[in-house]
Image (tube, grey):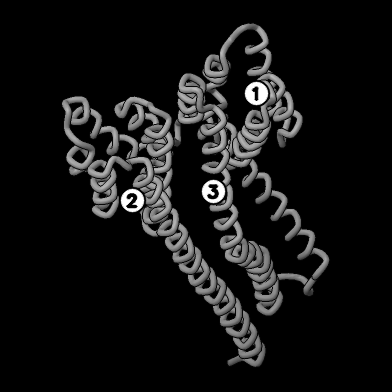
Amino acid sequence: MGIFTKQMSARELALVCRQMATAYTAGIPIIRALEMAGREAPNSRAREVVKAMREDIEGGSTLAEAAQRQRTYLPPMFVELIANGEKGGRLDAMLGDLATYYEDRVNLQRQIVTMAVYPALQLAIAWFLGTFAFMLLGQLGATLEGRGDAFDFAGLFASYVRFQGRAAVVFALAMGIIIVLSRSGVLRWPWGWIRTYIWPLSNVTRRFALARFCRGLSLLVGSGVNIVHAIRGAAGAAGNPFIERDLLEAVPPVQSGAPLTEAFSRSKFLDRTTREMIAVGEASGELEASLRKASDYHFDQATNATQVMVRVGFVLTIVLVAMVVGYVVISFYAQLYGGMLDGVGL
């Protein structure tokens, strides 16, 4: 379960979908497949969601109806694909496609986390060492200027521990407030604006959003969903309110009979390469395959953009650490020699 949302995470959905797809393809009834998926679910909330779906089916509901009742925890695209796969007799294929889709997202998230670990570690070290250095500098300065008692390292360390304790409490409270506001949807638009328009987050966000949109649209079109519903479902899967709103502007032209290429021609976020891929797919009748290629293209671009963002963060961290170290060193020697000069009456 995601920290900032009530919906199941990509990792949880990938495990559940893969387990269900494997069992259902092997001829195991869907109720039994759900039971097996529930046992393999990674946490209690995911197990509860799968269990609730299984109990609904045992009570006479279809899989689509059971998934619909869990919309609080299941993404709209998941619910839509399950419904169309069940209706079209392609449930095994839909579950397999969903599993692959969420597995790709998990792999990408792991790459991001892996690349971000070192800069995050540097920032943490800079915080702890930097705050300690500033406190040490303050006490040394007071001692050298004769404004305090003799240097007391034990007292300094105790003050430092108390300071870090207060900082940890403030950080925990801030994170708690952010999580609550995020889960309630309050931060969706403000945080979406930052991710969409502030570099270098903007480049990464747009690529990831378009990758999810193209992959989602490919899956929905391949499952036989009406193109208007497919656009709406895939736009929701983009995960960004500004990009979703922009992509949904293609719905009225499509409803009027316009081709997708024309409908997306005014999009501020869908680039020319993607529109050309869509045009080729429409002309050849291979729209699903073209959209999947467009998704792969954006995933590759997103990975490159993430690497650039991490490198920028790395450089900024190095600069910040260098500035802190330089300030501490200069201040220390300034106070040291200043105190010595004052001691000799100069």
Left or right placement of residue 38 versus residue 332 in this view: right
Q: Residue at x 25, y 29 (%)?
A: 251
* Nearer to us in this view, 161 or 208: 208
Q: Which residue is mark 1?
A: 49
Q: Which residue is mark 2?
A: 197
Mark 1: few, some, or many residues within 10 Å (few <14, many ≥20)? many
Residue type indicated by callout 3: Asp
**Picture coordinates of residue 324, whole percent (x, y):** 56, 73
* Nearer to us in this view, 89 or 244: 89
Mark 3: few, some, or many residues within 10 Å (few <14, many ≥20)? some
Up/down of 220 relative to 202, above or below: above
* Nearer to us in this view, 206 or 283: 283
What numbered label is drawn on residue 104? 3
Up/down of 26 relative to 29, above or below: below
Compare marks 1 and 2 and give the one earlier in the sequence: 1
Image quarter of the C terminus = bottom right
